Image: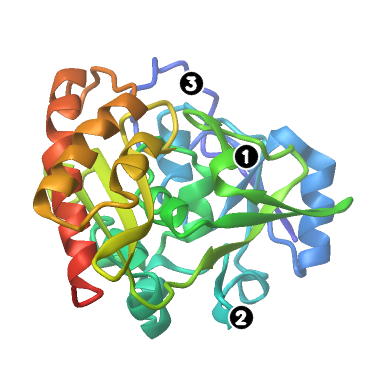
Amino acid sequence: MTFKVSPGPKLDINKANTHILPPFTLIEPGSLKELLEVKAKYGEKAAILAGGTDLLVKMKLRILEPEYVISLKKVRSELSGIRREGDEIVIGAATLLRDIELNDSIMRLAPALFDAVIVMGGVQIRNMGTIGGNLGNASPAADTAPPLLVHSASVKLLSTSGERIVPLEEFFTGPGRTVMRPDEIIYEVRLKALGKGCGSAFMKIARTAFDLAKISAAAMICVEDGVIKEAKVAVGSAAPTPVRARSAEDALVGKAPTPETFLEAGKAARNDISPIDDVRSTAWYRRRVIAPLLHDVLQKALGRIGV
């Protein structure tokens, strides 16, 4: 079903938010097949509307002015849900952040993602926003990205040409940019569940509780016989994309899980980030705070494995 939405003429407002949407044609596919066909037909001219918490803001600011907006309203059931498949947790792209927050498997087996979701705006936002939208928006400050990176996540992309699975580390190419082709949609997100002796956590520093992160960090560690056997660390809001902090990981593996080890890993993470000055913070502050932030995240992850 197609609707023409024309609230007024196209305005050159120098990116000021007038709270007025630019003209567009709204399309509501009735099935996943129809959704893929519409996306293939209109490509870069079309934007996907799931929760709209990012898209509508960008449209009001004229950062995005799509000719077509494709609503997922009638196909949400085909793109939503959380399930276990072996050692993976599979989350449909249109799954609400609120549903992730309330899911027992996420709390137990991917606690870093739970930590991230519960600090993403208020309940109203989490009842609208989706995990696919948060990743597809490709903000360096995307809260779900660092936890998903430490849980070895990948995204399944669909188009009329077929499907492909992309590791999340390869998904982001820059601020607001991904490897997705114009005809593709995010279908689901797959992440590794925690194994025995492992814990994960996420924290962020922001100006207010509802704000985007000045900097964020997630960690997953596995401890055996008093030694860190495996470690994954990721940082957000400190580079053009969310990044793995491999220097920090190298500083952790083979070491005892002590506060001193965690602080040294935090200092090592400075080698993995390239922060900038922007409206939320400064590069100097981000470099300064990464060490204590990562120390606290690692302590939290450690506490979740009872060590």
Describe residue 93's horizontal placement relative to residue 119 as left or right.
Answer: right
Query: Mark 1 packing: few (<14 Cα in 10 Å), some, or many (20+)?
Result: some
- Could you tell me the amino acid type at mark 3? Leu
Q: Quadrant of residue 42?
A: top right
Helix, strand or loop at mark 2: loop
Real-space Cα separation, disc 2 to disc 1, in angstroms = 43 Å
Residue 197: quadrant of the picture: bottom left
- Would you say 242 lies left or right of 237 here? right
Q: Nearer the viewer, residue 161 or 62?
A: 161
In the image, taking residue 186 as reference, residue 247 lies left or right, namely: left
Front residue of 57 and 234: 234
Q: Nearer the viewer, mark 2 or mark 1?
A: 2
Q: Disc 2 residue type?
A: Gly
Extreme residue toward the bottom, this view: 104
Q: Which residue is mark 3?
A: 11
Which residue, given by chain and number where applicable, does mark 2 sit on? 86
Query: Where is residue 182 shown, x and y percent of the image?
Result: 74, 37
Identify the mark nearer the N-term, 2 or 3. 3
Question: x, y (%) of residue 159?
Answer: 81, 52
Q: Are marks 2 and 3 in contact (CB under 8 Å)?
A: no
Residue at 13% in and 52% down: 296
Mark-to-mark CA distance, 3 and 1: 13 Å
Decide which of 54, 25 is in the foreground and name it: 54
| Relative to 304, residue 202 above or below | above
| Label pair 3/1, CB-CB below 8 angstroms | no
